[in-house]
Image: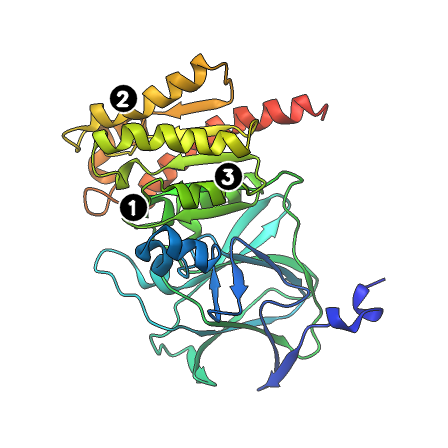
């Protein structure tokens, strides 16, 4: 039995255009993760806009950039169409348009993810049309039976409106479910936000999500993650399985980082006594003149936590991500390319695997 047959409020509102039925998100039966639609700003955002602007003007302006946003759904349609409205169009010299502004569709096969399409919207390609002032692209799916899909939002663009279109007679249902584990929360710099992955599903939080089938929330804010009390207090009230702290890159220097990260730890532990915290130093250890001092600033907080009997803290040294291959792992000497993100995801995921194995063992699973 479907709830829509009992409560009509759960029936998705749709419109038919050119033989396809379009659904305006958010709506049932689509499952939205990592972002939510905020009525007061009329955009998809990652956290409450008032909290974002209270943290800083730059965090407020970066909040609508939808890094980490995903939609999961199931359909037997032979076609899928995406219509997107942006407030602005982001263009960077060191990132692809797919990474900054595109959407990526993957198919969920069991707990694994299979890449299908990249939707590059706003470039007026031969597969793109304009509908109701939005950019629309239609792709062909396998169809024939119900299949599960995940659609990844852009890393560096806002999204004012998103519509998904399917064949008129196609069935549409909710998506493949994540594991029964609370989301992983990431907080950090432009690297955490996904700069400069070539696709939204190739930044390290997304790679870990694809490998583990565990939900996540991305609070990566380019140049603007400074460990402010406002946002850390907000993050510390989110139910999660693990908190990954990765803002070394945005701290102006080791002198700032040392008291900042200690206060971050104390604020987080005030609200979350038992959630594991993973501290990460930036991956460009060899490039930064004060890389050693910055790492030691983080380690001092890690050591302090250990001295207080906290056995739920972990530390990953940034120098271990790229090693001697640093020169082929970044786009500009700072931001990882896809190889760099893959290496980061592998190292971080090893630590997360240990934490999650311990958590599930303690639950008797």
Q: Secondary structure at mark 1?
A: loop
Q: Secondary structure at mark 3?
A: loop
Residue sitting at x 41%, y 54%: 52
Q: Which badge, 1 or 2, is on the more N-terminal residue?
A: 2
- The residue singled out by tag 1 in the image is 337
Q: Position of residue 139 (x, y in %)?
A: 51, 71
Cα gap from disc 1 to disc 2, whole angstroms: 26 Å
Q: Is residue 98 left or right of residue 218?
A: left
Residue sitting at x 63%, y 38%: 181
Task: Check contact, mark 1 vs mark 3: CB within 8 A.
Answer: no
What is the count of numbered marks? 3
Q: Say few, some or many: other residues with alpha carbon within 10 Å of mark 2 (under 14 / 14 to 19 / 20 or more).
A: some
- The residue singled out by tag 2 in the image is 296
- The residue singled out by tag 3 in the image is 236
Residue 320 visible? The answer is yes
Instruction: Please tell me whether residue 12 is drawn above or below residue 230 in the rendered image.
Output: below
Instruction: Please tell me whether residue 80 is drawn above or below residue 349 in the rendered image.
Output: below
Kindly give the residue lying farthest to the left in the view shown.
289
Residue in the foreground of this view, choosing between 133 and 250: 250
Of the two numbered discs 3 and 2 in the rendering, the one whose residue sits closer to the viewer: 3
Q: Position of residue 330 (x, y in %)?
A: 24, 43
- Report which quarter residue 77 is drawn in: bottom right
Q: Which badge, 3 or 2, is on the more N-terminal residue?
A: 3
Instruction: Please tell me whether residue 74 is drawn above or below residue 208 in the rendered image.
Output: below
Q: Is residue 74 left or right of residue 221?
A: right
Q: Secondary structure at mark 2?
A: helix
Residue in the foreground of this view, choosing between 141 and 56: 56
Of the two numbered discs 1 and 2 in the rendering, the one whose residue sits closer to the viewer: 2
Q: Position of residue 114 (x, y in %)?
A: 53, 51
Q: Position of residue 53 (x, y in %)?
A: 38, 57
């Amino acid at each position: 039995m479907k709830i829509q047959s009992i409560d009509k409020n759960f029936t998705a509102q749709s419109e038919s255009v050119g033989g396809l039925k379009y659904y305006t998100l958010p709506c049932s039966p689509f499952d939205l993760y990592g972002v939510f639609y905020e009525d007061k700003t009329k955009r998809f955002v990652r956290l409450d806009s008032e909290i974002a602007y209270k943290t800083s003007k730059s965090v407020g302006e970066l909040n609508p950039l939808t890094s980490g946003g995903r939609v999961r759904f199931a359909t037997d349609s032979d076609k899928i169409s995406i219509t997107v409205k942006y407030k602005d169009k982001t263009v960077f010299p060191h990132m692809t348009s797919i990474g900054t502004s595109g959407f990526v569709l993957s198919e969920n096969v069991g707990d694994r993810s299979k890449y299908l399409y990249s939707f590059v919207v706003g470039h007026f390609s031969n597969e793109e049309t304009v509908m109701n002032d939005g950019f629309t692209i239609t792709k062909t799916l396998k169809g024939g039976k119900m299949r599960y899909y995940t659609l990844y939002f852009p890393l560096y663009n806002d999204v004012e409106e998103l519509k998904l279109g399917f064949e008129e007679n196609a069935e549409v249902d909710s998506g493949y479910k994540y594991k029964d584990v609370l989301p992983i929360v990431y907080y950090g710099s432009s690297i955490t936000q996904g700069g400069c992955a070539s696709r939204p599903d190739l930044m390290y939080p997304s790679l870990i999500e694809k490998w583990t089938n565990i939900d996540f929330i991305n609070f990566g804010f380019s140049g603007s993650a400074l460990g402010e009390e406002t946002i850390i207090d907000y993050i510390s009230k989110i139910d999660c399985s693990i908190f990954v702290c990765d803002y070394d890159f945005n701290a102006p220097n080791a002198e700032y980082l040392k008291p900042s990260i200690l206060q971050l730890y104390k604020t987080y532990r005030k609200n979350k006594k038992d959630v594991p915290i993973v501290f990460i130093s930036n991956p460009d250890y060899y490039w930064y003149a004060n890389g050693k001092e910055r790492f030691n600033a983080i380690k001092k907080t890690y050591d302090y936590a250990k001295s207080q009997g906290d056995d739920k803290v972990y530390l990953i040294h940034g120098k271990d991500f790229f090693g001697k291959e640093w020169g082929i792992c970044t786009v500009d000497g700072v931001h990882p390319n896809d190889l760099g993100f893959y290496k980061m995801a592998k190292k971080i995921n090893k630590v997360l695997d240990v934490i999650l194995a311990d958590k599930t063992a303690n639950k008797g699973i």
